[in-house]
Image (tube, rainbow, N blue to C red):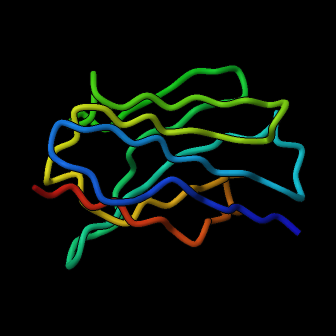
Amino acid sequence: QVQLVESGGGLVQPGGSLRLSCTVSGSIFSSETMGWYHQAPGKQRQLVATITPGGSTTYKDSVLGRFTISRDNAKNTVYLQMNSLKTEDTAVYYCYLTRGVIDYWGQGTQVTVSS
């Protein structure tokens, strides 16, 4: 049974930083493509970043230069380092694991950017 558990969300001021973590169990983590989505109130869930088993990454245009996705295979964990946070980054952030036709999601962690 694949499980994803996010942590690291919270309240931060504009310009601040947070690091989200997602720990995966029940899978061969090093073989999985991982990513982060976020969903703001009243908005559609959007892809933020992905990372392949080989370390290739993709990013939503609005987070380029500010967010970094990484993985630690020894810890079965994927991270999202978020710097220079903006109020528009406020959302629930979801970790995901994809096997193409089968996707798995974490429960979400709230990120609130506010003065």
36 up-or-down from 72: above or below: below
Q: Where is residue 56 in the image (x, y as percent from the top left)?
A: 57, 21
Question: Which residue occupies 36% across, 32% down?
Answer: 67
Side (left or right) of 106 relative to 20: right
Image quadrant of residue 85?
top left
The picture places residue 114, in percent across and down from the top left corner, at 15, 58
- 19 relative to 29 in the view: left or right: left
Q: Quadrant of the N terminus?
A: bottom right
**Quadrant assignment, res 62:** top left
Number of numbered discs visible in the structure rendering: 0
Residue visible at 58% across and 28% down in the picture: 70
Q: Which residue lies furthest to the left in this view?
A: 115
Q: What residue sits 77% from the left and 65% below the top?
A: 3
- Residue 44 percent location from the top left of the image: 28, 69
In what quadrant of the picture does the C terminus appear?
bottom left
Q: Where is residue 6 in the image (x, y as percent from the top left)?
A: 60, 59
Q: Could you say which is closer to the camera, residue 19 or residue 72? A: 19
Q: In which quarter of the image is residue 4?
A: bottom right
Farthest residue toward the bottom? 42
Residue drawn where x is 22% and y is 32% of the image = 84
